[in-house]
Amino acid sequence: MLNTFLERYLSTRIGVKPNTKSNYNFVKNLMKKEDFYYKKIGDVKTSDAKLFLIKLQQDGKRYSTVKTVRGVLRPAFQMAVDDDILVKNPFGFQLAGVLVNDAVTREAITKDQMRKFLKFVHDDVVYCKYYEVVYILFHTGMRISEFCGLTLKDIDLENRTVNIDHQLQRTSDMRYIIETTKTDAGTRVLPITEDVAQMFQAIIEDRNAPKVEKTIDGYSGFLFYDDNGMPLVAMHWQHRFNHMVGRYNDIYRVQMPNITPHVCRHTYCSNMAKSGMNPKTLQYLMGHSDISVTMNVYTHIGFDDAEEELKRMEEFRKAQAEVEQKKEKPMSQKMFKVV
């Protein structure tokens, strides 16, 4: 039966991160309500698998939810193939063409929108205290959990680097934990610009830490704390961004799109790609394990970006031509000596 085999598969998944474990429990609880969960594993065909996922979406489950379910079932059935129980994995198909992808894409905002939002935060009497954080996220591309996990020891203002080798998370049962970075590539030393270093300097100088700082899994000296003396986590910043964008849209007629810490990360990546940064360099800065994730940003560069790039190349060509022309000054007759 599928239910017992899924339990067997999950029992092999030891040492996974808390978020992954939560996903497993979520999928298991969801599956218990479905007839599909009690089918014989050998009776499941590819068409059955597709129809099951389609049913979930038709029942009102979001694309991301169905994708999560398939993300657990696919390796479970692959284990059945590896154990010679099945010849073929019925979940070995691509989701494209089977489900309607109704997920909202987290788009990068434009440079103009970024400048306007930063100016608003800087000038606002309520939200100006978050300006340095917003600036840093827009200009480093850090994951918000990486930023939350930063301690004083990770920030080297003299050499202008930030060490990223862990992240701070809060689990569903409200436990604070330190985890390794999302991927091995996420562990990196991030070079920072002078203006970003100044932002970190301001945060450190204004840091309002409790008298006895909380130590989490051996780490202490976090940059921000809540009223209970616990370090801030991603959810805190998510709420603050929601409030900032809401306030902006209450004031200005031209509305600002939804901005989240992840949108800041995506905007940084997009801006670096448009500036012509080498893809491998950008992959390192972003902490992407797969270059295809980085390259996907380059493929989303549109007509306006291409037009701007061509204008820039044309201006560069004209400037080059002017320099060459100055080098090739015509010789006057006075330069020739009569012999």
Image (cartoon, grey):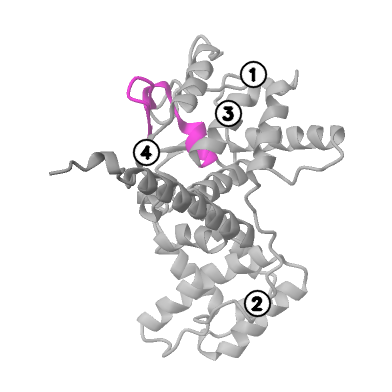
Disc 1 to disc 2: CB gap under 8 Å: no
CA distance separating discs 1 and 3: 18 Å
What range is drawn magenta here? 142-165
Residue at label 2?
53
Above or below for 259 versus 96: above
Res 60 quadrant in image: bottom right
Residue at label 1?
227
Above or below for 212 versus 144: above
CA distance separating discs 3 and 4: 19 Å
CA distance separating discs 2 and 4: 37 Å
x and y percentages locating residue 234 in the rendered image? 59, 37
Q: How many residues crowd around disc 2 within 10 Å: few (fewer than 14), some, or many (20 or more)?
A: many
Q: Describe residue 318's horizontal placement relative to residue 52 as left or right.
A: left
Q: How many residues crowd around disc 4 within 10 Å: few (fewer than 14), some, or many (20 or more)?
A: some
Q: Secondary structure at mark 2?
A: helix
Q: Amino acid at mark 2?
A: Leu
x and y percentages locating residue 145 in the rendered image? 52, 39
CA distance separating discs 1 and 2: 44 Å
x and y percentages locating residue 109 in the rendered image? 65, 47
The mark that comes first in sequence, 1 or 3, is 3
The mark that comes first in sequence, 2 or 4, is 2
Q: Of all residues shown, which one is farthest toward the front?
A: 339
Q: Amino acid at mark 1?
A: Asp
Q: Secondary structure at mark 3?
A: helix
Determine which of the numbered discs, if any, sits on residue 165 in the image: 4
Question: Which of these two is toward me, 276 or 284?
Answer: 276
* Mark in front: 3 vs 4: 3
Could you tell me which residue is drawn at 62 percent across and 83 percent down? 50
